[in-house]
Amino acid sequence: MKQRLMDAPPGTERSGRQEGHGDHPLDQYLKEGRIPHIWCAGCGIGIAFTAFLGALLKAECDMKKTVVVSGIGCTGRVAGYTNVDTYHTTHGRAIPFATGLKLANPDLNVIVFSGDGDLFAIGGNHIIHAARRNMDITVVCVNNFNYGMTGGQGGPTTPLEARTTTTPYGCAEHPFNLIYMAKASGAVYVARWTTLHTYELRDSMVAALKKKGFSFVEVISPCPTGYVRRNKLGSPLDIMKYYRDNSYITDDLDPDNTALPFNPKIAVGTFVDVEKPTFLDMYNSCIVSRAMNPVKKNPQQAGKGK
Ligand SMILES: Cc1ncc(C[n+]2csc(CCOP(=O)(O)OP(=O)(O)O)c2C)c(N)n1
Ligand code: SF4
Ligand SMILES: [Mg+2]
């Protein structure tokens, strides 16, 4: 990788965009000029990102029509490393930016890739309403149970009694169950995987990319520098072993029974896969068609009340 960076033509470090470089099948999706990345050793975001690039390849996404949007956070850096048009927006506002993009250009394939804090704390209101409207976007949330980028503060998914920099004696707040929340808000595709389940995660992202409507994929992921270290959960390899021994794949579970941690183990799989008209379907069939074809008033009634 270092060799490739040295070989990169001048200017790519800034623009990050190169054509035809490298020979790995995923190279075309990576802004190599932006490497080295910022992620810590053992962080799960890189695994989620690799699964995502594999999904772009497998889903045969048209890169000219694909846009990645993210908010601020370690996970949010995914937007900057993906070799498509990207939007690294303000903290918590990835969903409204994505919504605007989709409405302005419905041909675009719009993906939001962001963290648990970005999407469910400051951005919590946006995500529930985008799901309610069934906006045709794909949302990938890397859930590492804390605000990784800013020093490991507690957030809306921090488990009860877990230690973070803002909960040094343990977290006293009940966490959100993102699967249940996405389903209750109206998402038509909802899945969860851990960073151990790399192929399942990639294939789930393919399904989410192809799904018409609001699709949501949660990725349970370690933050070794923040959450894992403060809770003395061991090395990144120990976390992988933990995921292996404490997760099970199911497609039949009611989202209500998927709460973390760990009920009794981490339930992973696809929990929602249904069809429903999207916001744009409804907007076109309801508002646009009625505005274009107004019901003509009965001439006898037209004069009434004058
Ligand atoms: C309006 C605003 N508030 C707070 C911040 C500081 N901030 C930056 S990233 C972040 C949290 C990131 O956590 P998460 O979304 O879970 O991403 P992670 O770093 O864990 O991947 C916060 C609070 C900010 N940049 N802007
Ligand atoms: S602080 Fe945590 S989430 Fe951020 S890159 Fe490091 S390990 Fe990953
Ligand atoms: Mg986080």
Image (cartoon, rainbow, N blue to C red):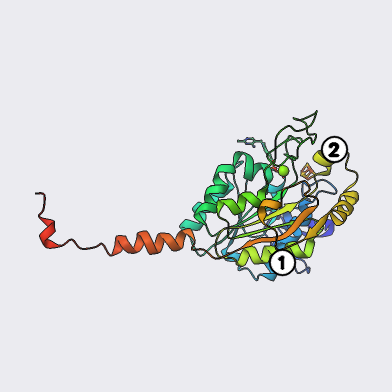
Q: Quadrant of the N terminus?
A: bottom right
> How far from the left and from the top, in percent, is residue 173?
70, 34
Question: Of callouts 1 and 2, which one flags the residue occurring earlier in the amino acid sequence?
Answer: 1
Question: In the image, is residue 132 above or below residue 299?
Answer: above
Q: Nearer the viewer, residue 38 or 171?
A: 171
Would you name the residue on which mark 2 appears?
231
**Three-letter amino acid code of the residue under disc 2:** Asn
- The quarter holding residue 168 reads top right
Instruction: For residue 80, say whether it is visible.
Output: no
Question: In the image, is residue 61 above or below residue 1?
Answer: below
Q: Is residue 96 left or right of residue 161?
A: left
Say few, some or many: other residues with alpha carbon within 10 Å of mark 1 (under 14 / 14 to 19 / 20 or more): some
Q: Secondary structure at mark 1?
A: helix
Q: Nearer the viewer, residue 32 or 267?
A: 267
Q: Secondary structure at mark 2?
A: loop
Would you name the residue on which mark 1 appears?
203
Instruction: For residue 88, say whether it is visible.
Output: yes
**Three-letter amino acid code of the residue under disc 1:** Asp
> How far from the left and from the top, in percent, is residue 56?
67, 65
- Residue at image point 90% right, 51% down: 237
- Residue at image point 74% right, 66% down: 26
- Residue at image point 55% right, 45% down: 126
- Residue at image point 67% right, 43% down: 176
> How far from the left and from the top, in percent, is residue 189?
61, 61
Marking on residue 226: none
- The quarter holding residue 91 reads top right
Question: In the image, is residue 26 above or below residue 257?
Answer: below
Q: How many marks?
A: 2
Taking the image as four quarters, which one is ligand 1 found in?
Answer: top right
